[in-house]
Amino acid sequence: AQTVTQSQPEMSVQEAETVTLSCTYDTSESDYYLFWYKQPPSRQMILVIRQEAYKQQNATENRFSVNFQKAAKSFSLKISDSQLGDAAMYFCAYRFNFGNEKLTFGTGTRLTIIP
Amino acid sequence: NAGVTQTPKFQVLKTGQSMTLQCAQDMNHNSMYWYRQDPGMGLRLIYYSASEGTTDKGEVPNGYNVSRLNKREFSLRLESAAPSQTSVYFCASSEALHQVETQYFGPGTRLLVL
C-alpha cells in the first residue's frame, strides 16, 4: 500500500523569506501523480501544485515550486517570498495513475508566517 | 459559483444520535466524495460516488451510509453516532472519478460526538 509521510508537523517562516516543506512517499509504481494541497483556516482544501512522475522537470506555480526526487521518493514544496496569506495546513498527496485509484494524503504540516 | 457547499458547519451530537451531513456542488461534476480528517492523520476517504446512482466504500466506511440523491447532492449519514466519529468531514467533487486536477473540496463540517 502507498504511504505518504510529512515529518514536519509545524513550520514557521518570516514574511518574505523562503520555506521548504518536506514530503516522502512509498510506492512500487512508476507512473503516478503527486500533489500539494493548502488548507487555510477556512478549512477549504485548495490544490497548490501537482507533479507527474514521468516528468523530470519540477513543477512551478508562481511562488510555489517543488523539488521532485523520484529515486529518493521525495517531493518537497518550496514557498518563496512568503506572505501572510500562505499561513495554512499543507498536505502532500499521492495518486497512482491507473484506473480509479484514490488519493492518499500525508498528515499535514502547519505553516505559520511571522510578520 | 458557490462550488462545493456543506451543511451544517458545526454539530454536537450525543452518543447514539443520528444525523445527516449535506453536500451539494454546482459544477456539474460527476463524482463526489466524503472524507474525514483527524489530528495527526491525513484525509481518509469514507465513501465516494463515481456518478449519479452509484456509491462505493472508501477506506473507513464503517458506521456511515451515503446517498447520491442526484448529480448535485451527496449526503453522509451517521445512524448511531459514536465518540470515535468526532472529526472534521469534507465533501469533495470532481469531473471524473479520482480526477485530482478537477477535485474541489467543501469548507468542512466539524462534528463533536459526546
Image (cartoon, helix red, strand yellow):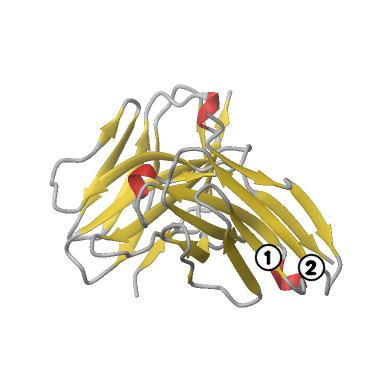
Question: For the residues marked 1 and 2, what is the alpha-carbon distance in whole angstroms?
Answer: 7 Å
Element carrying mark 2 = loop
Element carrying mark 1 = strand
Percent coordinates x, y for residue A66 in the rendering: 29, 41
Examine the rendered structure and indicate whether residue B18 appears above or below residue A74: below
Name the residue located 52 percent from the left edge and 28 percent from the top edge.
B1
Which residue is under mark 1? B77
Which residue is under mark 2? B18
Image quadrant containing the C terminus of chain A: top right
Label 1 neighbour load within 10 Å: few <14, some 14-19, many 20+ = some
Q: Which amino acid does label 2 sit on?
A: Ser
Label 2 neighbour load within 10 Å: few <14, some 14-19, many 20+ = few
Examine the rendered structure and indicate whether residue A38 appears above or below residue B87: above
Q: Earlier in the sequence, mark 1 or mark 2?
A: 2
Examine the rendered structure and indicate whether residue A110 appears above or below residue B63: above
Name the residue located 41 percent from the left edge and 60 percent from the top edge.
B50
Q: Mark 1 lies on which chain?
A: B
Q: Which amino acid does label 1 sit on?
A: Arg
Quarter where residue B107 is shown: top right
Image quadrant containing the N terminus of chain A: bottom left
Question: Position of B17 compared to B93: left or right?
Answer: right
Q: Which chain carries label 2?
A: B
Percent coordinates x, y for residue A7 in the rendering: 45, 58
Name the residue located 18 percent from the left edge and 60 percent from the top edge.
A31
Question: Position of B12 compared to B54: left or right?
Answer: right
Percent coordinates x, y for residue B89 in the rendering: 63, 56
